Image (tube, grey):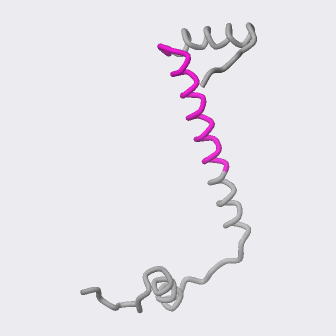
Amino acid sequence: MNISLPDTMRTFVEEELVEGGYQTASEYFRDLVRERQQYKAQQKFEALIAEGLASEAVVTTPEFWAELETKLFGKESGEMER
C-alpha cells in the first residue's frame, strides 16, 4: 500500500515520527489504525450499553436463568453432561 501525502502532511508525519519515537512511517500508520479500531470498538460498546440501559428491565428469577440456560446450552437446568 502506498500513500500519497501533500508536503504539509508529510512534514507533520515526519515530526510525529520523531516525537512519538516511531522507527518508520509504517509504524506510525499502524498505530493510527490501531487507535481508530479501538475508538470504533469503544463507540460500539457505548452504543450497546446505551441500548441496554434504554431497554425494558428484566426480572432475573430462577425460571429466567433456567430458560436462558436451555436456550444457550440446549439442556434443562441441573441436567449433567456425561
Residue under the image location 54 percent in, 28 percent down: 30
- Image quadrant where one finds the C terminus: bottom left
- Image quadrant where one finds the N terminus: top right
Q: Is residue 80 above or below residue 14?
A: below
Q: Is residue 72 above or below residue 42?
A: below
Position in image of residue 49 (x %, y %): 65, 60
Residue furthest to the left in view is: 82
- Along the line of sight, which residue is nearer the eye, 54 or 35? 35
Picture quarter containing residue 12?
top right
* Residue 55 as seen in the image, left or right of residue 21: right
- Is residue 54 shown in magenta? no
Residue under the image location 51 percent in, 15 percent down: 24
Position in image of residue 11 (x %, y %): 68, 7
Position in image of residue 63 (x %, y %): 51, 91
* Residue 38 as seen in the image, left or right of residue 4: left
Residue under the image location 41 percent in, 92 percent down: 76
Picture quarter containing residue 3?
top right
- Along the line of sight, which residue is nearer the eye, 10 or 68? 10
Report the predominant secondary structure element of the magenta stretch. helix
Position in image of residue 70 (x %, y %): 47, 87
- Along the line of sight, which residue is nearer the eye, 57 or 48? 48
Residue under the image location 62 percent in, 47 percent down: 42
Picture quarter containing residue 14?
top right
- Is residue 37 shown in magenta? yes
> In this figure, what is the number of numbered marks?
0
Magenta range: 22-43
Residue furthest to the front in view is: 1
Q: Is residue 76 above or below residue 49?
A: below
Q: Is residue 50 above or below residue 24?
A: below
